[in-house]
DNA sequence: TCCCATATATCGTCGCTCTATATATCGACG
DNA sequence: CGTCGATATATAGAGCGACGATATATGGGA
């Protein structure tokens, strides 16, 4: 229930990656481009931030990555696993809760009922 | 326009303090208690987090703090300055923007118009 | 009187983002 | 052909900021 601020950003970043992959398999660089354009430049991944996240999520089994063998530039294609899809939904709901609670507190509104 | 994740949490924490003081002057410990209860335990300040923020905001002129002289336990009462009130409103709006954009991206919704 | 809650303060650690750097390949342009 | 910029991944190191631990002090209740 309590939110730790230190891991909040981490969670948001992971969510950004996870939700970007909902559209279909992508490689890292493409994720960075898409998140940047989807958010109209509000959010953007530095390479040093993105790739460690990708490795982490793969290690946790939320993504599966495989190197594209075909001709052309070498890239690693990431796909949402079943667990990843479940995590995406769960975390997305969690974010909704956290954000709505945050806005309530910041606005100083009395919470009606929840 | 672009949001730096590293300072997002910092901004959120400062906003939490600022908005808590909108209710009236408070001392640090009271702010911690209020934020915790207002958010129903979702957000809470550790002492090592709160006091540096208070000092920072005071240094920036968004808060003014003065030691209560009266009898009783020594405490430092913080009050929102005019600049602090302005900052609170501005930052609050900024948070709204960031949050709504974030939810849009995470939900994968096409932005209608903005 | 002893302990707990109140109250403020600071230092050190740790986690995480971000910058910088390294490596490599493809396409375009001259 | 040769160079340059975009594509593409990777990692080490810097630096920022939250968090835990610790210190100090006092008021009130058992």
Image: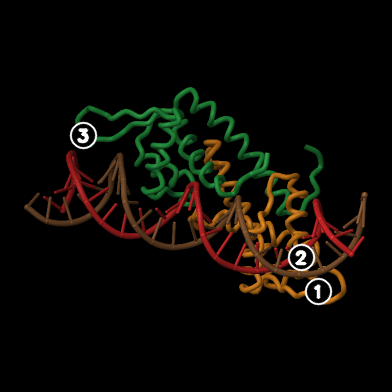
Chain colours: A orange, B green, C brown, D red
The residue closer to the viewer here, A83 or A8, is A8
Q: Residue A4 in the image: x percent, y percent?
A: 49, 55
Q: Chain of mark 1?
A: A
Question: Disc 2 to disc 3, how far (Cα)?
Answer: 62 Å
Query: Contact (CB < 8 A) between labels 1 and 2?
Result: yes
Local SS, label 2:
strand
Q: For label 1, count other residues whose C-alpha is less than 10 Å away and answer few (under 14), some (14-19) or many (20+).
A: few
Q: Which residue is mark 3?
A: B72
Q: Which residue is mark 2?
A: A27
Q: Residue C6 in the image: x percent, y percent?
A: 28, 43
Q: Is residue A3 visible?
A: no
The answer as to whether the residues below labels 1 and 2 share one chain is yes
Q: Which residue is mark 1?
A: A68
Q: Chain of mark 3?
A: B
Residue at 35%, 29% (x, y): give it: B65
Q: Residue B81 in the image: x percent, y percent?
A: 45, 25
């Amino acid at each position: 229930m309590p939110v730790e601020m230190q891991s909040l950003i981490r969670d948001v970043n992971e969510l950004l990656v996870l939700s970007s992959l909902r559209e279909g398999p992508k490689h890292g660089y493409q994720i960075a481009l898409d998140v940047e354009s989807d958010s109209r430049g509000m959010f953007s991944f530095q390479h040093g931030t993105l790739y460690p996240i990708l490795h982490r999520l793969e290690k946790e089994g939320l993504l599966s990555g495989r190197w594209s063998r075909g001709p052309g530039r070498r890239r690693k294609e990431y796909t949402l696993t079943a667990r990843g899809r479940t995590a995406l939904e769960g975390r997305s709901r969690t974010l909704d809760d956290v954000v709505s609670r945050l806005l309530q507190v910041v606005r100083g509104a009395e919470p009606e009922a929840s």
